[in-house]
Image: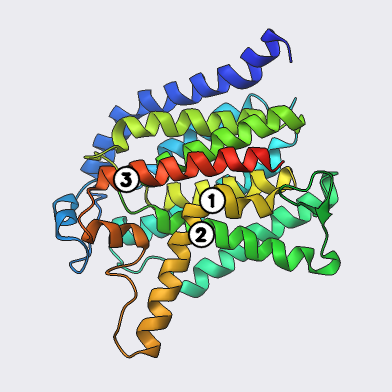
Amino acid sequence: MNSSAISSSIVFPVVLSFLITAVIGPVVIPFLRRLKVGQTVRDEGPQAHLKKNGTPTMGGIMILFSIVVTSLFYVRDYPNIIPILFLTLGFGLIGFLDDYIKVVLKRSMGLKVWQKMVLQFAVTGVFAYYLTHYTDVSLAMRIPFWEGHYLDFGVLNIPILFFIVIGTVNGTNFTDGLDGLASSVTVVVAAFFAVVAIGLGSGTAPISCAVIGALLGFLLFNVYPASVFMGDTGSLALGGYVAAAAYMMQMPIFIAIIGFIYLIEVVSVILQVGYFKLTHGKRIFRMAPIHHHFELCGWSETRVVAVFSIITGLLCLVALLGI
């Protein structure tokens, strides 16, 4: 790849996306504050989080706007970013609707569980249809550390796609619980996908670079102490991006490596709830998702974010060796 191509498809989307997020932040955040779009912190959570009550949420619209605008410059020349952009935007809109109902309409539960699942299945279904009918991307999955070998489940590929996509999206959603955590972890994952996209020539690098820039810009406002939270608008959108980017490069199995933090977050919730019910009130962790467990063990928010991000970075390096 020559220097001109590097600038246009790699450097430019990072810079543009970063600038968009950085510029609109000082406009969007006061607007959200005026709308009283504030976060409500659970009383049973870590006591240190109670001071976050009222911090504007729905900041994910900044991330989503930046990614969409930047990606539109590349849709024509890089058609493989279309399904990634669709899944990112689709889940982002589901998150926006959920946030809007919770914090603007003041209905604490947001979308009902069945409503959220129907919408998630619908968006995933459209993605699966587009992937199988309008791209030449196979649903066979690269096997880590076994070059040239793929895992193909045949007729089960579509059900597995639904499981992986929805699981990844909700794992990313659970990760969004500390200032800068989901942003920091996902920017490392996006950097991994950008590097792999360049190496494989998959034609998806621009959108991964746009995600990198958007998250770096968002972190200006989201690092501890955060002046805005991304809400479900951002976390669901990022989950959609991770799942779609993985599928466009036949790498969904790699999510278990690079997205280990997402995985352990959702598994910790499942284990906690299951054990609580089985034992009639006992707990495995002090609190789930697991980032809260470490907080209640005495870790600061910044330490949890740093450690989880470092783990993700190391696992991304391991995953690079497995391609």
Label 2 close to label 1 by CB (< 8 Å): yes
Residue at which label 1 appears? 259
Task: Determine the image quadrant of residue 50.
Answer: bottom left
- Residue located 56% across and 57% down the image: 168
The residue nearer to you, when weighing 275 against 119, is 275
Coordinates of residue 130 in the picture (x, y in percent): 77, 50
Label 3 close to label 1 by CB (< 8 Å): no
Coordinates of residue 276 in the picture (x, y in percent): 35, 83
- Does residue 197 lie above or below 84 as drawn? above
Question: Is residue 75 visible from the viewing direction of this image?
Answer: no
Residue at which label 3 appears? 229
Nearest to N terminus: mark 3 or mark 1: 3
Type of residue at label 1?
Answer: Gly
- Residue located 74% across and 56% down the image: 128
Of the 4 image quadrants, the one containing the N terminus is top right
| CA–CA distance in space, label 2 to label 1 | 6 Å
- Does residue 275 lie above or below 210 as drawn? below
| CA–CA distance in space, label 3 to label 1 | 21 Å
Nearest to N terminus: mark 2 or mark 3: 3
Coordinates of residue 270 in the picture (x, y in percent): 45, 73
| CA–CA distance in space, label 2 to label 3 | 21 Å
Of the 4 image quadrants, the one containing the C terminus is top right
Q: Comparing marks 3 and 1, which lies closer to the viewer?
A: 1
Type of residue at label 2?
Answer: Leu
Residue at which label 2 appears? 263
- Does residue 289 lie above or below 8 as drawn? below
